Amino acid sequence: MASEMGHERFRPETVAIKAGRPVEPGQPLNSAIVTASNYIQGGDRSYSRGDGTETSEALEAAVEELEGGWAVAYSSGMAAVSAIFDELPTGATVMAPADCYQGVAMILEAGRAHRGWQVTRLATDDTDRWVASLGSGPDLVWLESPSNPLLAIADVPAICTAAEAAGVTCAVDNTFATPLLQRPLDHGATYSMHSATKFIGGHSDLLGGLVVTADPQRRDRLGQRRVLGGAVIGALESFLALRGLRTLPIRLARAQATATDIAIRLSKHDAVRSVRYPGLSTDPGYPVAKRTLSGPGAVLSFETIGAADALDRATMGLRVITVATSLGGVESTIERRARLTGQEHLPATLLRLSVGCEHVEDLWDDLAGMLHRVAELDSGRAGSPEDDQPRPERGA
Ligand SMILES: Cc1ncc(COP(=O)(O)O)c(C=O)c1O
């Protein structure tokens, strides 16, 4: 883990670039893509489902240095989530946020239905209730901050510190914050978890997940579970995730600055009802985000005026931003989340925008065009749905 690796004196921007590389003279600067399942008997590795590969280990080593724990890499974020929830016994008590990634919400529901879990969902920002809930000795406290899709902010340091003092296992889904904006293990979290599919990979070209823990026994149990569950990350995915991690600091800095700019512009737009972004000083999560995160991240949500189907028509005309379900890439993506099964509780016209690295003015022109269309449709001035077919890319 980090303290043993000697890069602690470097800042995260440097660690992201240096960590997890070969260091011996004559070795390649980057870890090779090792596509072996089998290893010749007699060495440290025998089979990559159990031992990983040099490539997955390089990814783990880099994340270990950034987060300050031992990392286990998985085949997806959900495999990483499942590795934590698989530890829970039948009849477990779980505290979880009211707003969280829908896959986690589905795991909670399945646990309630089939394994007798007692699940309590708390408002992410109700720190007092989270801390008070620890008195009942839950088996797991699950946090997600900033949350998907409402960007709610939990006081991760306060809740994790209290959980550690109470001896309660506490996991933080750190996907939106990334290891650069929040290090939950520093505050006593038992686990920090990532969908590497998102910002760590950063190019929408891989699936991967990570769990980081400072407890060596838990690390061993996670590793053992991965052997048996078989949810190992592939060599190419490991390579791409590590390559993505190298540029995470600059991608995030750029995307975050753009997201802040766009959030401000959206909040002043007549066709926008509300904006949720922890970087806006008017956002309810702003004070805690300012104290607990090194930055507000690059995802925001906003609600528009008008009807949901009109909004769907308007988003079809976007030319820079892609309508797509994942996030955290260099390319901006947008989605009306209430369209998805299990997300019907969300406001019908809530759009989640993952801000990428395009030029801010191109992004804004795109959004402003969409909002103009929303306003037109809302006032009945718009043409037929055929007019809303995607327009060709610029220059095509
Ligand atoms: C916050 C969060 N956690 C976990 C996941 C699951 O990750 P994956 O899709 O890599 O399985 C997602 C995916 O969107 C997510 O947004």
Image (tube, grey):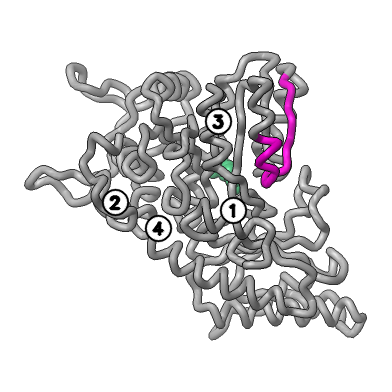
Q: Is residue 245 above or below residue 298?
A: above
In the foreground, 192 or 327: 192
C-alpha span from label 1 to label 4: 23 Å
Does the rendering let one see residue 293?
Answer: yes
Residue 73 among magenta residues: no
Check disc 2 and give the amino acid type. Val
Task: Report the amino acid beneath label 1.
Answer: Val
Q: Choose the circle earlier in sequence order: 1 or 2.
A: 2
Judged left or right of residue 323, residue 312 is right
Q: Tag 4: Cα neighbours inside 10 Å, few (<14), some, or many (≥20)? A: many
Q: Position of residue 82 (x, y in %)?
A: 57, 29
Distance of label 1 from label 2 (alpha carbons): 26 Å
What's the residue at 60%, 19% (across, down)? 88
Q: Which residue is mark 4?
A: 248
Q: Amino acid at mark 3?
A: Cys
- Along the viewing direction, whichever of 141 and 357 lies nearer the viewer: 141
Disc 1 + disc 2, Cβ < 8 Å:
no
- Number of residues whose C-alpha sits closer than 10 Å to that of mark 3, classed few (under 14), some (14–19) or many (20 or more): many
Provide the residue span drawn in magenta. Answer: 117-130
Label annotation for residue 170:
3
User: Is label 4 or label 3 in front?
Assistant: 3
Q: Residue at x 86, y 82 (%)?
A: 382
> Which label was assigned to residue 333?
none
Q: Which residue corresponds to the image point at 74% horizontal and 59% vertical from the top-left? A: 336
For marks 2 and 4, the one nearer the N-term is 2
Secondary structure category for the residue under label 2: helix
